[in-house]
Image: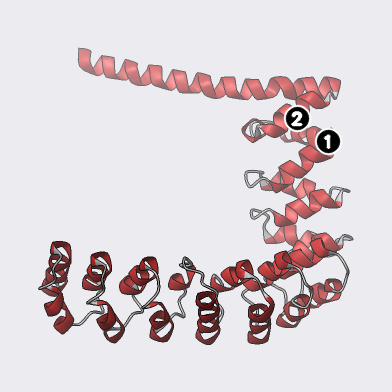
């Protein structure tokens, strides 16, 4: 009985501690909120807007006061923060400052209802960043000579292929990087970026899983020709095949490791690496499920113990 009583007492004390801390946290939030309501001193609102956990502990009328009388910088920060609650974003979506509304649209937690409220916004920047903006709207404002606007349009997943094609003609690396990462990019625009783009642009293009195997191969050929040794995002691309992987058979050690471990690599391709000078590459080949039993039997007699063990383990699992 004494042991049970002690356990219950310990649990009660833990509960009291946590409850006290929770209440104390809320009280800490209430003090500057009340002071701000009385004094309208920007110092109090800044303190609350920096610590969002305190804002969440406040009643709505306090938050409305802060949003109404707080600085524009504070409102912009609140609008862009992922932790900002939906009810606050709805208020910020009606703010007179377009920069605040722009950050609401860019906030990933803004739902469709909030985004729909801003579809007829007076600011082109807000429209360009809105993921619900139509292709026609984005096409119309793309011709504006405003780089920030064009950057937002190029990033927008609703941007049409024709608009991306037009934006690609504007000589700007940052803009080209945004275009290269957009899944709506067509072959014509991709080839244009390959011919005119820099290394950073091509790196973004490799990360775009919507590009074809043919385009991916051209990018790899260009990068290898330029002497770039360490680009590995290509090995994560779902459209990679033997033809592309074979380009890296005589490349650096890191590339050969990725080829040897690639789930897209065929047995025929892997056969080229069973005699590789690196035991680490040969070990990856031995562990690859696509390697044939015949090749595994060769690797069982490898000079490296780790390769032999990997080959035997793979063979036993067949």
Q: Dot 1 surroundings within 10 Å: few (below 14), some, or many (20 or more)?
A: some
Q: Position of residue 167 (x, y in %)?
A: 77, 75
Vertical comparison of 23 with 149: above or below? above
Place residue 301 in its image quadrant: bottom left
What is the x, y in percent for residue 247? 42, 81
Mark 1 vs 2: CB contact within 8 A: yes
For image coordinates 89% across by 60% down, the residue present is: 122
Residue 71, numbered circle: 1
Q: Is residue 108 left or right of residue 247?
A: right
The one nearer the camera, 178 or 277, is: 277
In the picture, measured across the screen, residue 272 lies left or right of residue 151, that is left
Hey, which quadrant is residue 2 in on the image?
Answer: top left
- The relative height of residue 64 versus residue 108 in the rendered view (above or below) is above
Q: Quadrant of the N terminus?
A: top left
- Residue located at (66% from left, 68% from top): 177
Task: Tell me residue 187's x, y (percent).
Answer: 63, 86
For the residue pair 2 and 317, the one nearer the viewer reads as: 317
Instruction: Say which mark, if any, is on residue 2.
Output: none
Whether residue 156 appears in this view of the structure is no
Residue 269 visible to the viewer: yes
**Tag 1's secondary structure?**
loop
* Residue under the point 35% across and 71% down: 256
Please tell me how many numbered marks the rendered image carries.
Answer: 2
Q: Which residue is mark 2?
A: 46
How packed is label 2: few (under 14 Cα within 10 Å), some, or many (20 or more)?
some
Quarter of the image where one finds residue 260: bottom left
Which residue sits furthest top? Answer: 2
| 231 vs 166, nearest the viewer | 231
Quadrant where the C terminus is found in the figure: bottom left
What kind of element bears circle 2? helix
Who is closer to the viewer here, 277 or 84? Answer: 277
Distance, label 1 to label 2, CA atoms, is 8 Å
């Amino acid at each position: 009985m004494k042991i049970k009583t002690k356990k219950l007492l310990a649990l009660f004390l833990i509960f009291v501690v946590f409850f006290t801390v929770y209440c104390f946290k809320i009280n800490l939030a209430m003090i500057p909120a009340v002071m701000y309501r009385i004094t309208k001193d920007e110092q109090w609102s800044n303190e609350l807007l920096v610590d969002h956990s305190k804002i969440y502990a406040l009643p709505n009328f306090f938050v409305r006061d802060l949003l109404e009388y707080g600085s524009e910088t504070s409102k912009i920060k609140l609008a862009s923060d992922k932790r900002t609650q939906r009810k606050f974003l709805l208020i910020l979506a009606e703010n007179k400052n377009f920069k605040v509304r722009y950050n609401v649209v860019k906030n990933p937690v803004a739902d469709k209802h909030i985004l729909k409220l801003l579809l007829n916004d007076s600011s082109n920047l807000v429209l360009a960043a809105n993921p619900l903006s139509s292709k026609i709207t984005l096409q119309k404002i793309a011709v504006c000579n405003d780089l920030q606007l064009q950057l937002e349009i190029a990033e927008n997943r609703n941007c049409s292929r024709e608009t991306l094609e037009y934006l690609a003609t504007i000589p700007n690396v940052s803009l080209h990087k945004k275009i290269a990462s957009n899944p709506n990019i067509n072959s014509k625009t991709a080839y244009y970026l390959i011919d005119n783009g820099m290394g950073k642009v091509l790196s973004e293009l490799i990360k775009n899983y919507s590009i074809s195997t043919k385009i991916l191969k051209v990018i790899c050929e260009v990068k290898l020709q330029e002497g770039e040794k360490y680009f590995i995002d290509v090995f994560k691309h779902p459209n990679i095949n033997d033809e592309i992987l074979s380009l890296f058979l005589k490349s650096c050690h890191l590339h050969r490791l990725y080829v040897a471990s690639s789930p897209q690599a065929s047995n025929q391709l892997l056969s080229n690496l069973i005699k590789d000078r690196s035991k680490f590459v040969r070990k990856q080949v031995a562990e690859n499920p696509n390697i044939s039993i015949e090749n595994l039997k060769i690797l069982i007699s490898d000079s490296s113990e780790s390769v032999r063990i990997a080959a035997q383990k793979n063979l036993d699992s067949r």
